[in-house]
Amino acid sequence: MLGLVALLLSGCGSWSWGRRSAGPVGWGGADRQDPALSGNGRVLASVVRRDGRDTVLLQEQPSGTVLPLRHLQRLEPHRSPSLSWNGRYLALLVQQGPERRVLIEDRVTGRLHRLPLPGGLVPESLSLAADGRRIAIATEGDGRSRVQLYDLTSLLEPDLPAGLPVRGAPAASP
Amino acid sequence: MTLGVRGLVRALAVVGALPLLLAGCLAPLPQPLVGLNQRLEAAGPARAPSLSGDWLALIVSRDGRDRVQLVDLQRQQPVPLPGLERPDAQPLSVAVDGRGERLALVRQLEGRTELVLYRRNLMALQPVPLQPPGVPRRVSLRADGRELAVEVSRQGQWQVDLIAVP
């Protein structure tokens, strides 16, 4: 009951919603779309239209400092970025020739992981779990849209909040 | 003799490269979660997934209507979302936090597009005002549910707002 009252009160005005712009993209009045926050909120990915090309932009928050990406140039347009907890992994869709592909860039090791999909399925959007253990991919194909989940544990190390033990790791000795 | 040494070097290079080549061929692949995928497939055409922790939010089409569905991945079952759905609302984008507690939703209702926040423990929906006003489209929620990022159209330009969730 108290919770409901607090909710009602907080909905009475916009004062309770702290808000800010995601900051300048550095390219004038470019459109900025497809936002995705890292699990801890310290990295924002968005897709910025520059010279008619959709390019993913990674920025530290709240400073707006642009973070470098290693592999993704020449694979535009980019769409549907998604980040892990600390922003170590950036999953997104890229265009490679006539094919739209699912890629994950590991910003720590610099590795690029390609996720093959069954033939005939075109990825439309994706969402990476914050710990990097799973990914959900929405596809079109065979005349219908579907969402499928994939286990990434054999591919990626977990990206966890600081101090959280890795599942399956040996317990520390006393 | 020189040729023999060159041949030996080449052979060693090939042997040395073999593990690398094999590693490339045998690189681990993401494994589809077959049981869950079958259940999702049976639920109907689906799009716009948001995955966080053990929760998957998505938009499912059923009986000619689009609905928000929240799936508990541990139990492999959808959970009820009382107070979220309206038969006259069209969901456009959904995002879930890592505890499956908060959902941010962009929906069309009565000719307007709005951003709302749903709290599962309260079974209550709260409008999120946009300042300055604009038309929201895609929304993303931080895994801890404390902040959302939303794409907003204002005067013909797409912008991203970051909004702290009280």
Image (cartoon, rainbow, N blue to C red):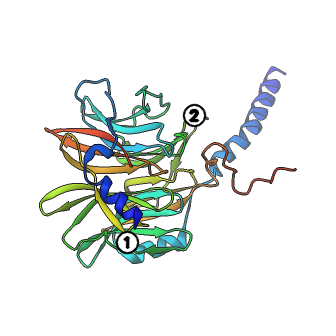
Nearer-the-camera pick, B97 or B20: B97
Q: Which quadrant of the figure contains the N terminus of chain B?
A: top right
Question: Numbered disc 1: what chain?
Answer: B
| Residue A94 visible in this rendered orientation of the protein | no
| Residue B80 visible in this rendered orientation of the protein | yes
Q: Position of residue B84 (x, y in %)?
A: 31, 68
Dividing the picture into quadrants, the one containing residue A61 is: top left
Please give the name of the residue rendered at 28% of the width and 24% of the height, measured from the top-left corner: A27
Q: Kindly give the residue lying farthest to the right in the view shown.
A: A174
Q: Which residue is mark 2?
A: A110
Dividing the picture into quadrants, the one containing residue B162 is: top left
Decide if residue B65 is on the left or right side of residue B52. left
Q: Position of residue B103 (x, y in %)?
A: 38, 59
Q: Position of residue A170 (x, y in %)?
A: 80, 53
Foreground label between 2 and 1: 1
Q: Would you place residue A30 above or below residue B143 in this image?
A: above
Q: Position of residue B55 (x, y in %)?
A: 49, 63
Mark 1 residue crowding within 10 angstroms, few (<14) / some (14–19) / many (20+):
some
Please give the name of the residue rendered at 53% of the width and 58% of the height, measured from the top-left corner: B53
Q: CA distance from mark 2 to mark 1?
A: 41 Å
| Residue type, numbered disc 2 | Gly
Decide if residue B160 is on the left or right side of residue A173. left
Nearer-the-camera pick, A10 or B50: A10
Nearer-the-camera pick, B96 or B4: B96
Q: Kindly give the residue lying farthest to the top in the view shown.
A: B2
